[in-house]
Amino acid sequence: MVNSVHQWLMISLFTFLHPFFISVIEINHNAKEKSVEVSVRAFVDDVESTLSKNNDIKVDLNNPKDKAALDQLIAKYMAQKIQISIDGKLQPMQYIGYEVKQESVWVYLEIEHINTLKKVDVHCNLLYDFQQKQINIFHVKANGKEKSYKLEYPKTIAGFDL
C-alpha cells in the first residue's frame, strides 16, 4: 500500500514538473454517409498559444471577439498541419467547426465522397510549432477495423492499412 502511494506521488510530481503535450486525432469512415469524419482534440491553451504566436494576435477560444475570423484561423492551421491521403489520393478536408469542452478543444473536419477506404496516409505536424514534446495519437476506424498510432516529434508521417 505504501509503495503504491509512493508511486502515485512520484507520477503526480513528474506530471506536474514535466507537463505533457498531446492531441488525439480520430479518423472515422462513415460508409453510410460516404465520408470520412475527422476530429482533433487538443488542450485549449496549446491551440490558443499556437494560433496567437502564428498570427500575432490574442486568441481566446472560449470568448472569441470575431468567431468567423477565428474559424478561418483554425481551418487554415488545420489544413496546413494535417493532410490526409485516402487510397493514395490527397483529399481536401472541409472545416466543420470547433467546440470547447473543459480544458480541451475539439475541431471537426470532413472529407466527402469516400465510398470505400482501404488505406489512409497522414502527414501531420500539428502543434509541433508550439512544443517539440508534442505527441499526436491517431485512431483510424474503417471496415469494422480500428488502428492506432503514436506520432512523436519530429516524425510527421503515419500510414494505416484497413
Image: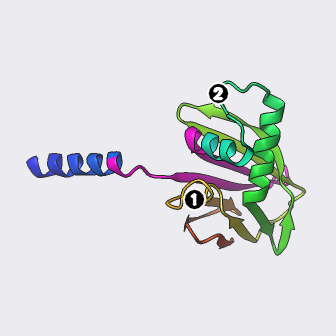
* Prevailing secondary structure of the magenta residues: strand
Mark identifier at residue 62: 2
Q: Is residue 41 left or right of residue 108?
A: left
Query: Which amino acid, mark 2?
Result: Asn
- In the rendered image of this protein, does residue 43 appear above or below residue 160? above
Instruction: Identify which residue is drawn at 71% across, 67% down.
Output: 122
Q: Residues within 10 Å of mark 2 (few under 14, many from 20)?
A: few
Outermost residue, right direction? 113
Q: Is residue 68 left or right of residue 152?
A: right
Tell me where residue 105 sits by quadrant: top right
- Confirm or deny contact between disc 1 and disc 2 (CB under 8 A): no
| Mark 1 and mark 2: Cα distance apart in space | 23 Å
Outermost residue, left direction? 2
Q: Residues within 10 Å of mark 1 (few under 14, many from 20)?
A: many
Q: Where is residue 17 shown, x and y percent of the image?
A: 33, 49
Name the residue tied to disc 1.
Answer: 136
Colour convention of the picture: rainbow
- Seen from the viewer's position, the closer of residues 111 and 34 is 111
Q: Where is residue 89 shown, x and y percent of the image?
A: 86, 71
Please check the rendered image and state whether residue 39 is part of the magenta-colored stretch, yes or no.
yes
Label 2 element class: loop
Mark identifier at residue 97: none
Outermost residue, front direction? 56
Q: Where is residue 113 shown, x and y percent of the image?
A: 90, 57
From the image, state whether disc 1 or disc 2 is nearer to you. Answer: 2
Q: Is residue 112 left or right of residue 38?
A: right
Label 1 element class: strand
Instruction: Identify which residue is drawn at 58% across, 32% down.
Output: 101
Query: Which amino acid, mark 1?
Result: Asn
Please check the rendered image and state whether residue 160 is part of the magenta-colored stretch, yes or no.
no
Q: Which residues are magenta?
A: 17-46
